[in-house]
Amino acid sequence: MDITALRTAHPDHWMKAAAIRTLTLDAIHAANSGHSGMPMGMADVATVLFEKHLKFDAAAPNWPDRDRFILSAGHGSMLLYALLHLTGYADMTIDQIRNFRQWGAKTAGHPEYGHATGIETTTGPLGQGIANAVGFAMAEEIQRARFGAKIVDHHTYVIAGDGCLMEGISQEAIGIAGRHALSKLIVFWDNNDITIDGKVSLSDRTDQVARFRASGWDVQEIDGHDPLAIDAAITAAKKTAQPSMIACKTHIALGSSAQDTSKGHGALTDPKLIADTKAAYGWSAGPFEVPADIKTAWDMIGRRGAAERTAWETRLAGLNGKKRDDFTRAYAREVPARLSAVIRALKKQISESAPSVATRKSSEMVLEVVNPVLGETVGGSADLTGSNNTKTGDLGVFDIDNRKGRYVYWGIREHGMAAAMNGMALHGGIRPYGGTFMCFTDYARPAMRLAALMKIPTVFVMTHDSIGLGEDGPTHQPVEHLAISRATPNTWVFRPCDTVETAEAWELALTSKETPSVLSLTRQNLPTLRTAHKSKNLTAQGAYVLADATGKRKAILMATGSEVEIAMAARDLLEAEGIGTRVVSMPCWELFEEQDETYRRRVLPAGPVRVAVEAAIRFGWDRWLFGQGGKREKSGFVGMHDFGASAPAEVLYEQFGITPQAVADKVKALLG
Amino acid sequence: MDITALRTAHPDHWMKAAAIRTLTLDAIHAANSGHSGMPMGMADVATVLFEKHLKFDAAAPNWPDRDRFILSAGHGSMLLYALLHLTGYADMTIDQIRNFRQWGAKTAGHPEYGHATGIETTTGPLGQGIANAVGFAMAEEIQRARFGAKIVDHHTYVIAGDGCLMEGISQEAIGIAGRHALSKLIVFWDNNDITIDGKVSLSDRTDQVARFRASGWDVQEIDGHDPLAIDAAITAAKKTAQPSMIACKTHIALGSSAQDTSKGHGALTDPKLIADTKAAYGWSAGPFEVPADIKTAWDMIGRRGAAERTAWETRLAGLNGKKRDDFTRAYAREVPARLSAVIRALKKQISESAPSVATRKSSEMVLEVVNPVLGETVGGSADLTGSNNTKTGDLGVFDIDNRKGRYVYWGIREHGMAAAMNGMALHGGIRPYGGTFMCFTDYARPAMRLAALMKIPTVFVMTHDSIGLGEDGPTHQPVEHLAISRATPNTWVFRPCDTVETAEAWELALTSKETPSVLSLTRQNLPTLRTAHKSKNLTAQGAYVLADATGKRKAILMATGSEVEIAMAARDLLEAEGIGTRVVSMPCWELFEEQDETYRRRVLPAGPVRVAVEAAIRFGWDRWLFGQGGKREKSGFVGMHDFGASAPAEVLYEQFGITPQAVADKVKALLG
């Protein structure tokens, strides 16, 4: 690469881009770890994007109508941190850059949402960013349709690398974006032909241009170091009716001796290499120094959007009151007061009518009353609409000619759906929920973890949550998936036992500000167990006494979801024999764990024998069986011990021994 | 669709295909559940494939050189069961078909590997089959290069639906197959334009033909109901130098009133619909009846390959002894006696030299001695070769011009890698292992679960297994992933504390016949703790006493992997204060659980206080803290309580309080 030619062709541009490159070199040198090559390769694209196109105001990083910039290739985090610092984001000080990858710094190894303003999403696990971006772009379309283009009118820009494009999730994202003609989504592909193992061609020879076109994208191919070409391509991309991919031919670790090599992908820390590279760039400032003229030029870029932002604020202020309130309320993740009223009313009606329904259907009943009062919900399913019961009458279907539609047919793309839902939640103004079979938690896992890590309240509606799904067999029967989500920090796993608990779980999920929820719902019908109406949300305590012993309490049965019915029937058997039995419904372990010790002890007092009943493996239950006042000699578990099988549900419950009689027998054996 | 025209154009073909369709209708009617449409739509393709092309012998279902037929669209299981029954697989009786989806039947809702012969892999979770198939085809190439085309020379055929192609994993599979020009892989796409939610176009408008071509596939487009076109396409596909995709335009639920609708995807159980459809087919036999002439024709298809098979057996018998033994031994999943000898020798040498190395490096040291004596291993990494340390000097790189190569650069495709490894294991004759960062268990999860469910010994090499990876931060730091794999039935999770335990873990993983292994390995260096050589494999017991209390035993420290070092240092602190402390290394909970109670009690006797140390969340540890003789009042945990952070590893251990001092303090607090 002829660096001198690049420098001289566009000297102003060059020095601005060089500031990104040298900050990258300095920060990674100081940290002695990181990824130098990507920021060095993509600095030109990023500079042109920020200078000429990105609508943002560094002084107002959370301006709702800003363009979103998503660094899907998150290992190149120094590109983002350098941009935020250079354009004047208040929290991205030079000290933060100096402390790259150090304890307490905002400049984590990969961009972490919430650590610093301007970080729109957490990236690093490859392919997530581009799939989040699809959600961002959909959220923008939905909000624009609802609030008008004067309030919502922005682009979503993504930088994706070869790794992002090799991950399967990228195909799901590309497919969704193409299908919905998300024209305001613009992806830059950092086409540098290098991965960690070597040349891309070692593992992939896919024609990415043809691949994107096959899904209905507009594609351009440019020299990623030519600022004029970059500018022209972005200008053109903004005009297309399709999502755009701009294939940017770049040189990883540009201008260094590691250029165009896999070594250049990683941390360039050799002092001579750094010195030589800076010399080649024509950069004479010291480490972490940006010459004043260059910093000023960048500061002006950071302020470029200020007028547009204030004009937008005026327009927002001019919106009619209800609309404006809805807009700002949803961005603040607040819910209208009516939400709890409609949920209470539903609970009351259900407690009185006591229907027998599957909790997936209960969930639909809740959504039918919730969606009309919570205009920011966007529902969907990964091609299981009729099974997940996620579509309510009022939503309308999101489509190219119906951007107001609030229901998304995601296709058979659990992972893409989950990541796009995260994108919607991150965009703001939207509360996304989406369904699949609980077993396919596995497919959505990487995005579900990121929702928890990012502290966003995405709702995962997981139906067919046990062997109770019956004949589809073990590939479709979750046994370890409750444990998987319960093991994940900052995740609420709700397994409601009836419609009332389902309504309570939804209320918690929809009012959550920082915790994603997993709703574990049955395929099979369940009776209403909460027949005495309580306006209080009992599920908020995580666990509570559903039915107490009538005489002396000798046993406590703990159960969740469909097995609470079994525990109640076992209680009948035991009480009939004079064995006082309490049933504790435990719809959400995490919330129970958050209660004070006094409450927990009141629900699970020491003394009685304990049996847990759950049509899943035992893993995790020992916390409640042996801990919390329990004793291992006086505890038992009735549930699954291995994968399931294919047969009608009632046969499976019988064969796997998850029955009232088995529970009663276990209690009696423990009582001795 | 003009059924009459189809019937009359190729009457013999028609009736054979109709047998598949009517058995499907009858079985699903009897089960009152299942998926009728896909077998009805793809019966013509399957009939031509089995009649004219598939190399198989129903009397010898496990013939190693048979063609493999993989039903990636596993919900259409009746297609496969009907084919197996019709062609005369001994175990697929008409009673099995009658008992479709019933307890104890081989005919599960989705095809389950191991339930019946002729089921090459478990499918149902969409996209897995096509990705397995890539592994099958690679295994064939590798074995053909090694044993010659007279012994190994077969095709892998796949039927994939729209769901398979929408799942991201399919892109990973397509990319790998295209990159490696797996010309003996032939995929039929059931292009019926219908998913559960409705028309495919609701969620996807990808040009699949262009998409496959973009990754280097040969593609043909045919009428999937025209037997001549099907035959010609397969004939052509076998001749190409690329993997082939045959886009078969079909009608789901062909000939029924539900044809071409999403209703037709599911269970067609209406008696009138079934009667009308059979009438349209010209089928007058009763339920589960196949007229003798048609059954005879199918039986002949099932015997078509017998002569070829016996000729092959003669050729195998003619192979030189060593080669033949290697071939049959690997298929039997047996290992040569030398394996344990080289592992013992390595253990001895390590115990003596006591190096300080990361266990990912330990793993490489083991593989360096193992791979030369175990010719059936195939290693790889999802673009982290230098980090996962999975490549040894002798393997050679699998490529188009080096089919003998035993190392695969999988690219950034954890999911595709895991599923393809499963395919290799299922193919037989290969022991696959592959690496990624442990956190990306999330990406590989669906395939890891299937390895456990299918009972195949795939080895997942998961390095960078805790906050010990340092600066890459929480996106890359597993905290819940040990729990995720431990919660999964039939999975061995090994977390070795040093090179000796790593060697023992590998020995177990490589001699496993029915259980996949997860190796949880560190990025950071660890001392050798097993300095006294024992030829016995102590890891096989799951947990054992690494160091006992010198005086009266007051405390037991339980730890795994990198935290065993911390436990040992804590023991030093405690012993110095006169607190007798035992350290139990627990490299594999599952194997410890399998030991008899006497052994478990000997390792973890009741009485002393217990502290577990693991740089992961506590979830699951209560089994050993409170259970197995423990007491909650006398137990503690030192580990993670939330996601990690970005900083140097030693800072993280200090900040998160996972230190010898913290462990010693916890013990002392519990001792009171």
Image (tube, coloured by chain):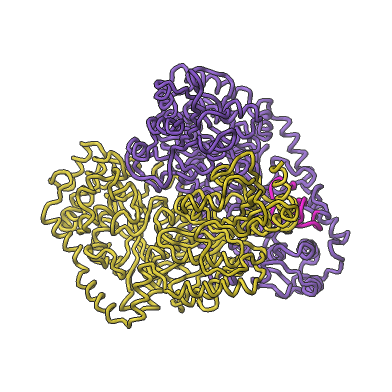
Chain colours: A purple, B yellow
In this rendering, would B337 be left or right of A286? left
Find residue A65 and report its horizontal and vertical position in percent.
69, 41
State whether the magenta stretch is mostly helix, strand or loop: loop
Does any portion of residue A452 appear in the rendered image?
A: yes
Q: What is the residue that sits farthest to the left in this orientation?
A: B292
Query: Can you give x and y, in whole percent of width and height, for residue B116 in the image?
Result: 29, 55
Q: Is residue B221 above or below residue B350?
A: above
Q: Observer-nearest residue: B332 or A228? A: B332
- Residue at point 45%, 57% (across, down): B170
Q: Closest to the observer: A386 or B406?
A: B406
Q: Residue at x 48, y 69 (%)?
A: B179
Quarter of the image where one finds residue B212: bottom left
Q: Left or right: B511 with respect to A601? A: left
* B292 vs B340, nearest the viewer: B340
Q: Is residue B450 left or right of residue A228?
A: left
Q: Is A105 one of the magenta-colored residues?
A: yes
Q: Residue furthest bottom?
A: B320
Position of residue A359 relative to residue B573, above or below, is above
Q: Residue at x 43, y 60 (%)?
A: B131
Answer whether residue B466 is magenta in the image: no
Q: Which residue extends farthest right?
A: A292
Span colored in magenta: A96-117
Q: Is residue A125 above or below residue A640?
A: below
Labels in figure, total:
0
Q: Position of residue B264 (x, y in %)?
A: 31, 43
* Residue A50 appears in view: no
Along the line of sight, the residue nearer the viewer: B527 or A620: B527
Query: Residue B335: x percent and y percent?
Result: 41, 71
Quadrant housing the C terminus of chain B: top right
Q: Residue furthest front?
A: B551
